Image: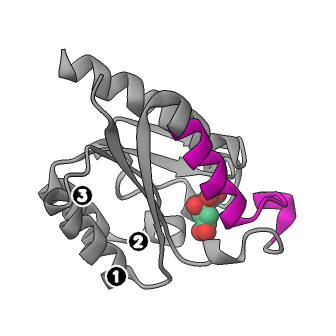
């Protein structure tokens, strides 16, 4: 079975996980989430690349680069850009790479402005509300999806 290459993108303020609003985002640090993804990736024969930025354009650059890097799928938590960024939506559509949108919190249980996502309708799926586990569920889902399209 061929090794899948998955890029995990984390948007603004997610570098603060561990201390940032733990009631919404839990106590797990970003480094710990990345480590958990790498470990699950080893079990599933997936190589994980991860990247965090507080800057919209840097995230766009990374998405544009993903095709050239041979990335098979993207897991993205666009954080606040979820609700505002046509640029991230356009970058994902231009890349034509299958992706899953992830949120630690259940955005539909929160303020109305968080209910809208600029990316969700272009995603394979959305996982929200399970804290750090949202990322692991997304990885399993993406793996299943990419393995099915491979056949
Ligand atoms: C978030 C939800 C967003 O509304 C928020 O701006 C974030 C994190 C989440 O993971 O729950 O920064 O994407």
Residue 122 position in % (x across, y down): 28, 45
- The reply to whether residue 138 is in sight is no
CA separation in Å, label 3 and label 1: 13 Å
Instruction: For label 3, count other residues whose C-alpha is less than 10 Å away and answer few (under 14), some (14-19) or many (20+).
Output: many
Secondary structure found at label 3 = helix
CA separation in Å, label 3 and label 2: 14 Å
What residue is drawn where x is 86% and y is 60%? 23
Magenta stretch: includes residue 29? yes
Magenta stretch: includes residue 63? no
Asked if residue 106 lies left or right of residue 83, the reply is: right
Residue carrying label 3? 92
Sequence-wise first label, 3 or 2:
2
What residue is drawn where x is 67% and y is 47%? 106
Secondary structure found at label 2 = loop
Q: Quadrant of residue 85?
A: bottom left
Q: Main secondary structure of the magenta part?
A: helix
Q: With respect to residue 32, does 100 lie above or below?
A: above
Residue carrying label 2? 84
CA separation in Å, label 1 and label 2: 16 Å
Instruction: For label 2, count other residues whose C-alpha is less than 10 Å away and answer few (under 14), some (14-19) or many (20+).
Output: some
Circle nearer the viewer, 3 or 1? 1
Indicate which quadrant contains ligand 1. bottom right
Circle nearer the viewer, 3 or 2? 3
Quadrant of the drawing holding the N terminus: top left
Secondary structure found at label 1 = helix
Residue carrying label 1? 58
What residue is drawn where x is 54% and y is 66%? 79
Disc 2 residue: CB within 8 Å of ligand 1? no
């Amino acid at each position: 079975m061929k090794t899948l290459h998955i890029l995990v993108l984390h948007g603004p303020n997610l570098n603060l996980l561990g201390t940032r609003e733990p009631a919404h985002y839990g106590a797990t640090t970003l480094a710990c989430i990345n480590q958990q993804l790498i470990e699950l990736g080893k079990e599933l024969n997936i190589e994980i690349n991860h990247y965090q930025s507080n800057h919209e354009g840097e995230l766009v650059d990374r998405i544009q680069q993903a095709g050239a890097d041979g990335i098979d799928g993207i897991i993205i938590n666009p954080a606040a850009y979820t609700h505002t960024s046509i640029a991230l939506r356009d970058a994902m559509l231009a890349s034509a790479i299958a992706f899953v949108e992830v949120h630690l919190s259940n955005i539909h249980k929160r303020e109305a402005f968080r209910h809208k996502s600029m990316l969700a309708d272009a995603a394979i799926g959305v996982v929200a509300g399970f804290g750090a586990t949202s990322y692991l569920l997304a990885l399993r889902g993406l793996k299943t999806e990419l393995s099915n399209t491979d056949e």
